[in-house]
Amino acid sequence: MRISLSKKKTLEGYLFILPWIIGFVIFLAFPLGQSLLISFKELKVLFGFKFEFIGMRNYFEAFLIDVNFVPAFIVIVRDVLINIPLILIFSIGMAYLVNQKLYGRGVFKIIFFVPVVIVSGPVIQRLFLQGVGVASIFQRLDIGGFIYTYFDPIIADPLIEILNRIIFILWRSGVPILICLAGFQAISPALYEAAKCDGADEWLMFWKITLPMLMPILEIAAIYSIIDSFTDVFNPLLNYIKHTVFKNFRYGYGAAMGWTYFVLIFGIILITLAVFKKYMFYAEER
Amino acid sequence: MHKIQEMFSGKTKNKIDKISRFGYKNKDFLFKFFVYLILIDVAFVFLYPLIYMVVASLKTAQDFADPYTYWIIKQPTLENLRDAYETMSFLRSATNSIIIALASSIAQVISCSFIGYGFARGKFPGRDLLFILALFTLIVPPQTIIVSLFILYQRLNWIDTYYPFIIPSLFGQGLKGALFIYIFRQFFKGFPQELEDAARIDGAGGIRIYSQVFLPLSKPAILVVSLFSFVWHWNDYFEFSIYIMDKRKATLPIKLLDLNWWFTEVKMGYGGATGMFQLNEGVEMAGCLLVIAIPLILYAFAQKYFVSSIERTGLVG
C-alpha cells in the first residue's frame, strides 16, 4: 500500500515525538497524577505500599497544624519576590556593561559563567555556613550594625538577609546574564541609529528601545530563575519534604505538600507572565 | 538580506561613533573607566568564593586561628586536600559522578535533539499543543513528583542503581530535559527549508535528514546542551540522595554533604571513640574544591566555544 507524502510526513513527525510522549506519560504525567491521589491518602503498610483514603486531612494538617509548613511557604514566596527582580535587574545591568565595546569583555563573560558550572547545592551550603557571603565583606564594614541602627527591624531583617545572600543571588544570575546578552545582540542596530538621528542619548535609548525590546527575553530569564529556585539550597521545602517522606515515611503528607508547592509555583508563573504581558505590547504593536 | 542590512548599519554606526567620540572624548573615557570599575568589582564578587576556597584549603589550623593571616599564608599545606581526598574516597566518588553525568548527558543530547527535530520540522496535528505540554513539564517541581517516582522506581527495582537518571534522560525527560528540547528546536528552526528539501529530493527520510544533515551542523547546540546537562547532573544532589542509599555508589556532592561523618569514621576508625572530631574548615573547603574541580576543568577547556555557542544556539528564541 502506498501512502501519500504528506501522510508519511505526519507519521514521521509522530515518530520523532514518540520517545517524548512515552517519557512524558511514564515519568511525568503518571507520577503527577499518582502523587495527587496519594496526597488524599495515608500510608498504612510500607512494604507493598498499601494506602488508606483520608480525604483532605493532609492538606488541613499542612495549613492548620504543621508549624513548619506555612513559614516555609512564606519564605518561598518572599524569596521569589526578592530574588527574581534582583537577578533580573542585575543581569540586565551586567549584560549592558559587557555589551559595550571593551577590551577583554570575553574574560568577563567567562567569569560570569563560572558560577553556573560550580553552583552545587552542597558546595553552596558549605560556603554559606562558613560565612563566605557575609563575614569578610559585610561584617568588616559593619553594614549590619549600620542597618539595625537606622532601620526598623521589619525592614532591617529582610535587608540583612538579602545582604547575607547577595553573593549567592548574584551567583544564580550567570545564565540570565547570558540570556540578556544574547537578547542585546538580537536588537537591530537600525533602531539605535534612527534614535540617534532624532537626537536621543544613551539613557533615553536604554529606556525607550533596549528595555522594551528586551522584555520577551527578560520573561524567559524570569521563568528560568523561578525554575532554578526549585532545587536551590535555600529552598526550605526541599529538605522538609525529603525528611517527611523518607525519614518519617509519611508519603501522603509529603505528596500533599508537593502538590501545594506546585500550585503555588504555577500561580507565581501565571502572575509573572501576566506582569510581563502588561509591558509587552510595545514590542508587539509594530 | 539581513546580512547586508547588518553590514550597512555596522558601517554607519562606526561613523556615528567616531563623530561622537571626537565630540565627547573625555566623557567617553570616564564612562569606560566606570564600566571597567564595576565589571572588575562584580567579577571579584563572582570569583570571591572560588578564591576563598583555594586559599582556605591551603591553610593550617594555626593559620585559621591567626587573625593576621587572611589571604597571605606563611606555610601553605596540602594536608587538607589530602584529608578531603581520602575521606571522600575521591577516586571512587569521582568515577561515580563521571559515569552518571556522562551517561545522562549523552542520553539527553541524543534524545532531546531527536525530539527537538520533530518539534522543529515535523508537521502534524497537535504539535504546538504537545510542545506547550513539554514546556509545562519544566515548571513541575521535583518535590511534587518525587514521592510517586520513588514508588515507581522501587517497584522497578531501580533503587540503588543509576537507572533513575539515565532511563528518563533517554526519553527526553530527566533534569530540565524540556529545556534542552527547546534549545534544539530553536536551533533546528533556524535552518533553511531548502536544506531539508534538497535532502528529500535525494531520497533521504526524516531519520537520515536528522542524523546526517541536521546533527552534523548543530555542534554549537550539542556543545551547550552537553555541558549544561553534564554540569547539572554533576551538581544534582536532591534526587540522588533519595534514589541512592548505597554509600559506595555516592557521588562527590553527596560525599561532601556528610564529609563530617566520613571524616570521623575514617579518623576514628583505628583510634577508638573519643568524641566527634572537629572538622577543620580547611578540609571542608578542600572538599568543595574537589567537588567542583572536574566541571571547572571541563569548562576551562570548553569556554572558548561555549560563550559564543550559547549566543548562536538561539537559547533566547
Image (spheres, coloured by chain):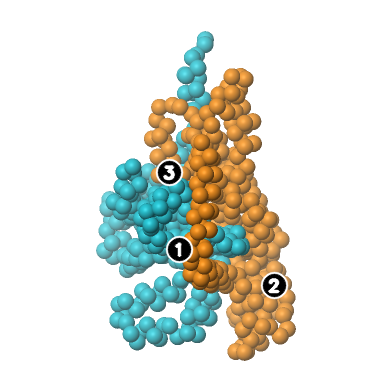
- Quadrant housing the C terminus of chain A: top left
The subunit letter for the residue under badge 3 reads: B
User: Percent from the top left, x then y, of residue B156?
Assistant: 53, 43
Label 2 neighbour load within 10 Å: few <14, some 14-19, many 20+: many
Disc 3 is placed on an element classified as helix
Q: CA distance from mark 3 to mark 1?
A: 28 Å
Disc 2 is placed on an element classified as helix
User: Percent from the top left, x then y, of residue B285?
Assistant: 62, 73
Label 1 neighbour load within 10 Å: few <14, some 14-19, many 20+: some
Chain letter corresponding to the colour orange: B
Q: Amino acid at mark 2?
A: Leu
> Which residue sits at x=39%, y=30%?
B126
First in residue order: circle 2 vs circle 3:
2
Q: Amino acid at mark 3?
A: Leu
Q: What residue would you read off at disc 3?
A: B135
User: Percent from the top left, x then y, of residue B267?
Assistant: 68, 76
Q: Amino acid at mark 1?
A: Gly
| Image vertical order of residue A120 relative to residue B181, above or below | below
Q: What residue would you read off at disc 2?
A: B81
Q: Return the residue nearer the eye: B233 or A142.
A: A142
| Image vertical order of residue B143 relative to residue B71, above or below | above
The subunit letter for the residue under badge 1 reads: A
Residue B77 can be seen, yes or no: yes
In the figure, what tint was chain A given?
cyan
Quarter of the image where one finds residue A205: bottom left
